[in-house]
């Protein structure tokens, strides 16, 4: 329906999220991995149903890079704020499924709308890498010609470390 594949299933890969965000970073990777692990815990062996997942973010949308994370959550789950798709004849609605500044312990909570089952997810890249240090090595006052030159490789390598250590950086409860 509305141009989706015939069976209604499709996969969203990290590179597509990077295109949507306009860049790859620890925040984008973290939001992708939180969603991946959160939905896997929520749906187990079932296929998640886009548009049938409520997303609650602990912090305000304006705080730091929360908006970037929320864009990733929206892209994958379909959950949107009051600006989202209103649906057709009561179906396919995405509006009012994304909330900020919520009273949760985790970074984000994903809730299945069909069963009410929820999981909270946290992300801590500092368990394996320090993105700020890598960034500052390229733009900070101590940056050198060499650290600026090697920055793109080290940044990409950092993302790989995050992906290769998903169980150390993402916690689902």
Image (tube, helix red, strand yellow):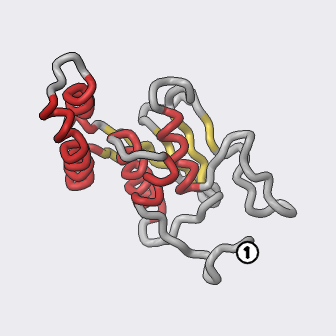
Q: Kindly identify the residue that appears in the image at 83 percent across and 60 percent down.
A: 90
Q: Residue furthest bottom?
A: 6
Number of other residues with Cα within 10 Å of mark 1, as a class: few under 14, some 14 to 19, many 20 or more = few
Q: Residue furthest front?
A: 145
Q: Circle 1 is placed at which residue position?
A: 1
Decide which of 104, 126 is in the foreground and name it.
126
Residue 121 showing in the rendered view: yes
Report x, y in % for residue 70: 53, 41
Could you tell me which secondary element the residue under label 1 belongs to? loop
Image position of 119 (left or right of 101) = left
Report x, y in % for residue 43: 48, 63
Decide which of 115, 171 is in the foreground and name it.
171
Report x, y in % for residue 131: 25, 34
Mark count = 1
Q: Is residue 131 above or below residue 164?
A: above
| The N terminus: image quadrant | bottom right
Q: Kindly identify the residue that appears in the image at 56 percent across and 29 percent down.
A: 61
Image position of 25 (left or right of 86) = left
Report x, y in % for residue 119: 46, 48
Q: Kindly identify the residue that appears in the image at 64 percent across and 83 percent down.
A: 6
């Amino acid at each position: 329906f509305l141009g989706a594949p015939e069976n209604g299933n499709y996969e969203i890969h990290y590179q597509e999220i990077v295109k949507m965000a306009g860049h790859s970073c620890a925040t984008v990777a973290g939001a992708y991995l939180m969603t991946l692990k959160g939905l896997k815990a929520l749906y187990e062996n079932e296929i998640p149903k886009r548009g049938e997942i409520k997303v609650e973010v602990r912090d305000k949308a304006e705080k730091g890079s929360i908006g970037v994370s929320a864009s990733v959550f929206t892209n994958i789950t379909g959950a949107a704020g009051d600006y989202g798709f209103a649906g057709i004849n009561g179906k396919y609605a995405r509006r009012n499924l994304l909330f900020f500044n919520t009273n949760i312990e985790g970074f984000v909570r994903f809730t299945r709308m069909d069963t009410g089952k929820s999981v909270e997810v946290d992300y801590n890249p500092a368990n394996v890498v320090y993105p700020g240090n890598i960034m500052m090595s390229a733009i900070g006052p101590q940056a050198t010609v060499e650290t600026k030159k090697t920055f793109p490789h080290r940044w990409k390598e950092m993302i790989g470390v995050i992906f290769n250590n998903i169980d150390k950086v993402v916690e689902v409860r």
